[in-house]
Image: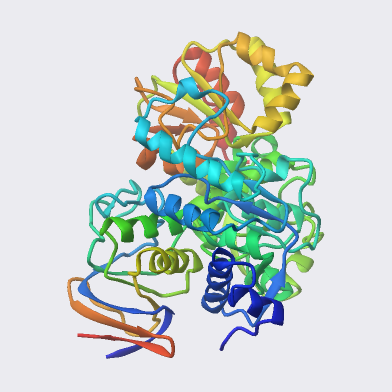
Amino acid sequence: MPVELSEVDRSWLAGAHGEASALAMRIVVETAGVMGAERLVDIVAAHVDGCLYHGLAGLEFAERLAAGGARVSVPTTLNVAYLDLLHPERYRGDRETAANARRQMDLYVAMGCKPTWTCAPYQLPERPSFGQHVAWAESNAIVFCNSVLGARTNRYGDFIDVCAAITGRAPLAGLHLDGERRARLVLRLEGVSTRLLASEALHPVLGHLLGTEAGTSVAAIDGLPNDTSEDRLKAIGAAAASSGSVAMFHAVGITPEAPTLDAATDGEDADEVRVTPERLRAARDELTTTGETALGAVSVGTPHASLAELDRLAQLLEEHRPTIPLFVNTARDVLTEAERRGSVTALSDAGVEIVTDTCTYLTPIMGALDGPVMTDSAKWAWYAPANIGADVVIGGLEECVRSAAAGRVVRDEGLWADG
Amino acid sequence: MAEARTLVPGTGRGEALVLEQPLSFWGGVDPATGEVVDVRHPQRGANVAGRVLVMPSGRGSSSSSSVLAESVRAGTAPAAIVLAEPDPILALGAIVARELYGRTVPIVVSSGPSVRAGEVVSILAEATGATISD
């Protein structure tokens, strides 16, 4: 069925705002057709992923839009890019790639996007409110936006993100609609020890399992403590959007559209999956690619570390001084705030390498590795082996810091025992 | 001949590469060569270039649009993609490649009889509908 367009939509297509804006509207409308949308919806904000350099196609697309005078028409934040502009000396790649990547970043800023350079735009002060329609790219941000903020976005990718930002319109389909947001699958935690439920080591692993089980579906997790923090929900979502294509999940009693299990499923039947310690141990082991325990480095902060996570890292470093390189990725805005609060000094004193604007698995920053990398991020563990050729070991943040001090894997195996 | 739904129109012919599991192009395919590099994918090492890529769905990262468009630019893209469920992220990569380079990867959705691995098939995807044939 063809997409029903407003008069304004048609005028954009006809080139009323220039050829580049017409191209943007064409892409929004064609994508709306792919998604089966009946019409388009106004969005109040966008988060753009297309600023990350993957090769000339992405750069040439941005050139075409910017050269045609396209500008974003709603507040638009930018995702991580290929370069750390605050710490350029860390980059170990070739110059031509860096020049192309820099050009691509500049083009998006020229189109009016804010140079936030973060995969965690939900940690910035101006984040979408409950019920608002937005067009967000970046898989972990999409999950957080829908699940934790209760704002509405589909899994937008490169290209459509900026086209929606330029036109202020997105396909009215999928998770923009009430009926698509209910859980069709329930993950019920069973026999998991109170220690593991209280530990930060649980969430990336649980998210990994969620992605494997849910695929593209909306699922509800039942059995997490009510005080589960945003950082922990972030870890679940990022993992689930890596091992699966999850764009939204509910945490019963925690996330805004799931005060009860019944609210999450809208009272309808849902398939049930039992999440036992045995299954969690298996998921954890899937995220580790090596039996080697002498580590080359530790990388935390994927998605970008929040203020609370930087504070906690600073606290852990008081007792455990790293003997191998320890990297933390964060947003430049979060770093500025952390500097103001004084927690950055503790990180620098401990020799922590702080990375902004990008991430250690996207760009050559870590250098030659003398062994596997330990991380607290299931997303990092999922992608780093292919992206930068690293072997990985998963653990919680505290385990990562203890391991960085010991130079070898230190994990609390007792956490994962039957409860 | 099997009927299918068109996501991105076009025509393509090639030997079928049938993936048992979904594949994320970002982090999963090297656009310089077309090789499957996802270390956890059971068919790591296979090459998608010029093949009719048959898989259940896309997966994971929203950067897959860029990687697919880049593989069209570099000449390492599949000849066509057959999915069991629609994937707007891959569709976007193909749509933008057409806008930029005037060539694309047709993408269709088919839940019908599956294409066999190694079989040479033609995809004809028009706005009104698509067919998969020998």
| Residue nearer the viewer, A106 or A117 | A106
Q: Determine the image quadrant of residue A86.
A: top right
Quarter of the image that includes the C terminus of chain A: top right
Q: Determine the image quadrant of residue A340.
A: top right
- The residue at 51%/76% (across/down) is A34
Q: Is residue B131 above or below residue A146?
A: below
Asked whether residue A215 appears in the rendered view, the answer is yes
Q: Is residue B99 left or right of residue B75?
A: right
Q: Determine the image quadrant of residue A274.
A: bottom right
Quarter of the image that includes the N terminus of chain A: bottom right
Asked whether residue A390 appears in the rendered view, the answer is no
Q: Is residue A368 left or right of residue A187?
A: left
**Image location of residue A258, percent across then percent down:** 77, 60
Q: Is residue B36 left or right of residue A273?
A: left
- The residue at 65%/65% (across/down) is A167
**Image location of residue A124, percent across then percent down:** 74, 40
Q: Is residue B114 above or below residue A293?
A: below
**Image location of residue A149, percent across then percent down:** 76, 53
Q: Is residue B73 above or below residue A382?
A: below
| Residue nearer the viewer, A77 or B118 | A77
- The residue at 53%/35% (across/down) is A358
| Residue nearer the viewer, A362 or A193 | A362
